[in-house]
Image: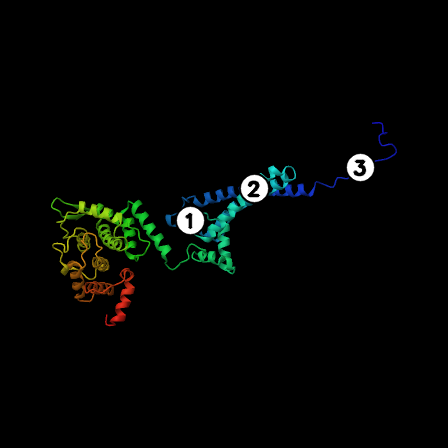
Amino acid sequence: MNNSIFGDHVPTVPQWTGPPHKIVYVQAMLYASLATSLFSAFLAMLGKQWLNQYVSTELQGTPIEQSQNRQRKHNGIVVWHFHHVMESLPLMLQFALLLLGSALSLFIWGIDRTIASVVLGITVFGVTCYTFVIIAGAISMDCPYQTPGALILRYLWQKFPSHAMLSHAWGLVAQHPVKPGTRQPPDQHVAVMDFHCILWMLQTSSHSSINQMTLRYLSSIPTSPGFKATITADCFKLLTTSISITKDNQVMVLKGLEQLAERAAACLLSTISHTLIVDPKSKVLKEVYEQYNNTFPYAVDLQGLPFCYTISGVHSLFSRGDYPEGLNWEGVDPSTPENVLLAHSLVKVASLCSQGLALGQGGQENVPDWVLQFSLHCLLWSPKPPVSVITDCLSIVAIELGCEIPDDYIRSLDKRYVCMCVCNPAV
């Protein structure tokens, strides 16, 4: 006010050179986080517009032209890597969150380290969890925590598997392809997954055509450790829902369900045989055994069914009978697929009886007469039956003569065929 406080000394006014470097770094990260978030939101709204345009239905033109237009849109999505653009949006948001946590931790550290430690601890915990998610998704394709980072890490592991410490993880990663469409040789893991899918389809589907296709696939795949005994109960349920039993104990197939009933009967015999080998004391098998005896009387008439030989085999195995009354192998047609599956299933029955494990056989050690008669009759067919039927019939005869056939040979037709060809090339 009076210019006397400094006397003759004139003070130097300090020059402002800008904010401290720490503030500049913090503000840069905060604005980068804000810009990244806004840009990802902008792309997300554009993505919704693009998807709405893709799913929109063209009402002009013929159905063929509309289908061609839809296919053109799909091809454009593939060519222009639309999937990768949409996958980049979560990455941008994750990067923005990392910038926000880092900026807050750096800024609050110079003000109060207690508060900064809390923010920094939560940030580090989030980064650690996200890193674990990426590694878990990269190691296993079955892991539900799949992220773009996991795909990138899996690609790098497969391209540069050189680090010794990652050899075990690389071995796990190498079991799964980078692209879902890549074909792989079957293994136990794939077999277990196939049987889980079959079990889910049989328990959830109520459409006869879908159940029929599922049973067809079940009969085409080889037995494996991934087999589920519950499939036996599902096959029996499909069989009982497609047939009816009259008062005079005659089995009738419902109209329109002939193929489903035939396929269910074939799969029922196959799954029962396999369950008896793998787990003869299975609770599921005992439940099916009780349900079968409650549904089918002992003196049931099976003649006239298109799958009478298969269901007769099931009936003989479950009804404590050695030879079903009225079963005549003279009418067996060697060209029908039913007999191929029947022959392979009866090999398992013969093996089980020789071990005294067959349910309802009372521990008998001989091959049942009806099984042995089937094998001897098939060997006399003219023209010759398929190679698989010959192998199965010779295996039944070998079991009756006291030869020991390992369980893995019983499950695998190829092993028994190769073994017989080595012992007797004339086969």
Q: Is residue 61 above or below residue 341?
A: above
Tag of residue 120: none
First-in-chain label (3 vs 2) = 3
* Residue underneath mark 2: 121
* Other-residue count near label 2 (Cα within 10 Å), few / some / many at <14 / 14–19 / ≥20: some
Quadrant holding the C terminus: bottom left
- Whether residue 214 is visible, yes or no, is yes
Which class describes the residues within 10 Å of circle 3: few (<14), some (14-19), or many (20+)? Answer: few
Q: Tell me if residue 306 can be seen.
A: no
Residue 284 x, y percent position in the rendering: 26, 47
The residue depicted at 30 percent of the width and 54 percent of the height is: 217
Identity of the amino acid at label 3? Val
Q: Comparing marks 3 and 2, which lies closer to the viewer?
A: 2
- Residue at image mark 3: 13
Residue under the image location 50 percent in, 54 percent down: 153
* Alpha carbon distance from label 2 to label 1: 50 Å
Which label sits on residue 70?
1
Identify the amino acid type marked 1.
Arg
**Residue nearest the viewer, comparing 67 with 186:** 186
Say whether disc 2 or disc 1 marks the residue closer to the N-terminus.
1
Q: How many marks?
A: 3
Q: Residue furthest top?
A: 1
Name which residue lies at 15% across and 58% down: 370
Nearer the camera: disc 2 or disc 1: 2
Residue 83 picture location, percent across and down = 48, 49
Q: Farthest residue in the right direction?
A: 8
Quarter of the image for the N terminus: give it: top right
- Pick whichever of labels 3 and 1 is earlier in the sequence: 3
Between marks 3 and 1 in the image, the one whose residue lies nearer the viewer:
3
**Mark 3 and mark 1: Cα distance apart in space:** 72 Å
